[in-house]
Amino acid sequence: MGRRQFEEGWRRSTSLRKLANPGNGGTRMIVNSPTKADFEKVAKENLTQAFNLLFKVYDNYIDHDDEVIREEVPIDEIWSHHHGTIRTALILLHQAIESLMKGVICETSPLLLIDKPRKDWPSLPTAEDKDFDSLYTIGGEALLTTFCAVHSTIERNSELINFIEGIRQKRNQAIHGTNIKDVEPTYIIENVLTTFTIWFGKDSWHKELKNNLLQNPLFGYFDADYESAISYKFLDFALLLLGKATLSHHLSINLKNRSYFCPECKRGIERDYGTLKSKWAFLRPNEPTATSISCLNCHQVFDVVREKCNINGCKGNVLYDDPEWTGAKICLTCYEQHDYEDES
């Protein structure tokens, strides 16, 4: 048998094996097709990056802890200076939403994403394998229409469609035009959180940001407890821009409820490095007899004692029994210590 005959026979047998064994590709010669998880991973990365781009601008600004600077350089001037950063965050937000729609479509079939007539698909036995990433995929109206046509647990209603289309139009202005002055940091952050909530549920935005913080290869080299607790700044930033009512839509706890210091976060921040003024712990449930609190920052639950404080006129009645750290009960409203009474 000559070399040419051998190679031809090998190609035919290979095609037959693919046809006979769908588990190894069958007639589908498009390889390395993406999954829903692949697109969700990309989407979360884009959403996290969009949030962090604006958060870092804010964080750098508040690091200038000087009232004179704050008066002479208001935050609005800082945002105007970082107009390009806002534009980039908007583009990342749009890319994230497209990735999430593609993930939904992948649950039915990633082949629905291919922007090519089926007659041109490399699916015949004689066709060469094509990597999915080398093919053009649908976008814009075609992507939105396909997203609405396939099965999903995501409710596709007019509100969601208008939400997606609104961001797409803003993104087009950012890419093809120059006038996006009406896109403020508040618009970006609110829609980043809305996207997280629609696809992954309440609290997911903060958990993802915190997880990204903890997975940084440099995490822990300074102080693990402090670096973990510092994620309270994400909550402070979102609260500053959105207010309690709007932010509550994206958290499992109503921020209109009374808040308390979290003993774990307070300890992590104040042990050596600073002062924590933010209160992100809430009674669970929000009732007068509740004996536990849940922290939105560290996502831990702590048992508490319902006793009155009365130190310096404090009206708090939620104390944390902390024998190992301070050897006292701590009021989670004013954070004053109540020494144990002598029981002898």
Image (cartoon, rainbow, N blue to C red):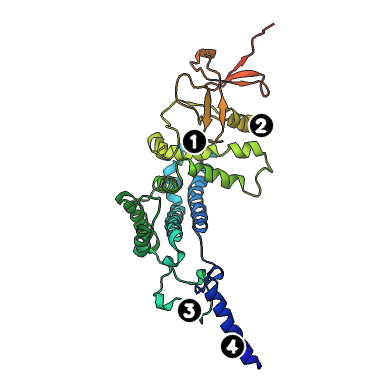
N-terminal of the pair, mark 3 or mark 4, is: 4
- Residue 256 visible in the current orientation: yes
Q: Which tag is nearer the camera, tag 2 or tag 1?
A: 2
Q: Which residue is mark 2?
A: 272
Residue 178 visible within the image? no
Residue for badge 4: 8
The 10 Å Cα crowd at callout 2, few under 14, some 14 to 19, many 20 or more, is few
* Residue highlighted by disc 3: 124
Tell me the residue that label 1 is attached to: 68
**Amino acid type of the residue that numbered disc 4 sits on in the rendered structure:** Glu
Q: Nearer the viewer, mark 2 or mark 3?
A: 3
Hey, what amino acid is under mark 3? Leu
Instruction: Depth check: give the residue in front, 302 or 59.
Output: 302
Q: Position of residue 336 (x, y in %)?
A: 58, 19
- Image position of 294 with respect to 38: above or below: above
Screen quadrant of the C terminus? top right
Nearest to the eye among marks 1 and 4: give it: 4
Mark 3 → mark 4, Cα distance in angstroms: 16 Å
Which numbered disc, 4 or 2, marks the residue that appears first in the sequence?
Answer: 4
Crowding at dot 1, Cα within 10 Å, few <14 / some 14-19 / many 20+, comes out as few
